Amino acid sequence: MPQAGNPTSAVAAKRRRRQQPVTLKKWWLWWLLLPGCLASWTRYIEEYDSIRVARCDARCGENYPDECVENCLASNYTKPGYCPERTSMTPFEAVCLVACVDDSRCPDLAKCCSHDCGITCMHPVGLDSRNDLPAVPENLQIQQQKRNLVLLTWRNGRPGVSNVSVNENNDDDAVRYLVEERHLVGPRYLESRLSSWTVCHVSTKPHATLRGRLKTGHWYQFRVAAVNGNGSRGYSQPSRPFKTKEPRNPKEPQNLTLSNARLVGGKLRINLRWVKPASDVPISFYKVFWSRLIHGPTNDSILVYHKTILKDKTCYELKNLELKCQYFLQVQAVAVYGGRRLTSRKASKVFNSTDYMAYADVGRRSRRCERTQAGLHVRRMNCQCGEVKARLVWPTSGDVGTYNVTWQEESCSREKGSERRRKSAAWKTVQTSYYDLRQLRNDCMYSATVRNILKNGESDGHGTSIEFFATGCQGDQKRQKYSRRKARRCKSKSSRSRRQFSGLFVI
């Protein structure tokens, strides 16, 4: 006969089950405090290396005053490890430059090392022999719990390596886990298009919860570094690529308003403005539609116009409108995800041109519909003989002698999956702060990068990049309407463009 269960054990089990949700609630509340900790780090990471900030945080402790961390960051710090031998240097490390004066000027683990030709930042050796540094985290795992909630877990590293802290209390738990991420938007994973590594989380335990920080329709990779008061051994191997949920269509543009109405040559002009809508992936461009009802002797018809507006512009000037007519205005947001268009619902507004004086902005100066972006952007885009021409514009610098412009076709919405292929990148060196990209295919996504070449011939970094959607041509039907004179002119321009383009290098 089976023995009856112990009533004391049953009561204890029920008590444990009742206490478990309470423990989980306390655990999740602890995680909610971490974004605030990371926010306090942001001001330091903008100026100092993230591993250096984590080291000072571990040295000062959790209840540190700001003065302790600031003094730690300002002091000279000799990083652990030794400079490598001359024979093991990479060509970048052995370059004849004076690139640093001490270890604090080098990123991550790199040390400032002198050699026969210069002083440069080099990756140290001898870190494995140190027993006062935390081990490199291993086995980084990703678990997606909900739509926008991801759990990261990892092991503390190789067994047998001690994690020793150097704070006054000899607290072995004074280790900061620095979680970094890089990402790209799109249905396909392309490592070459990943963003730079940035800190997204700081933890004191070998796990992290990322809530509300991952964008839909993106690929992500993570890595973790364990840092204590002495420094770090470096980052773990990157995690497997992780893709979030498929993006949804953008929301419709908000708050359609009219302003600056005026008569020019008997025709009406008016500015249509809107507010950028929320979108899981970046907005690629907008479509503006305006239509009016035409009464004819036999039947009525609707005349519809439309215009494509670049993504950084939320205003369009409607021209050549007739007086005493009623117009139906619509704005639609379009995002391109790979080769697929995600379109929003059309925001609409009815405008009676008879009442245009209500939008005349009498007595005050109205803003014009122009972009005011300081960085690299597309100034204008138009159609030339069935192909798109786009002008890139960027800010000038007195130290720059020339600019290296690189552009490449990424995807086309009209191509099928089997036809898609990544085009080779072309580049051109110019002295002006603008360049016209010609012979772009309509309805295709392009990426462009501009790098500053200093007057001494050196490059000042990775450059500035932009992605844009080439549009504006209506297709072959419109080209068939050209007159013979226009067709000959397009043919002549096309042959000249091909001769000029043949002088460009393809990489």
Image (spheres, rainbow, N blue to C red):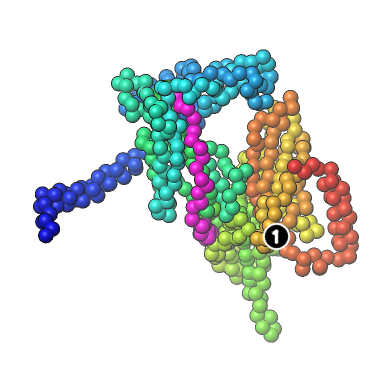
Q: Residue at x 67, y 51 (%)?
A: 410
| 433 up-or-down from 94: above or below | below
Q: Does the stretch in magenta take in 101?
A: no
Does residue 430 appear to the left or right of 344 in the view shown? right
SS state under label 1: loop
Q: Position of residue 315 (x, y in %)?
A: 60, 54
Does residue 59 appear to the left or right of 499 in the view shown? left
| 151 up-or-down from 288: above or below | above
| 166 up-or-down from 204: above or below | above
* Residue at the extreme bottom of the image, as rendered: 298
Q: Work out whether residue 195 or residue 465 is closer to the camera in this orientation and state it.
A: 195
Does residue 231 appear to the left or right of 374 in the view shown? left
Which quarter of the image is occupied by the C terminus?
top right
Q: Residue at x 21, y 51 (%)?
A: 17
Which quarter of the picture shows residue 97?
top right
Amino acid on which disc 1 is placed? Glu
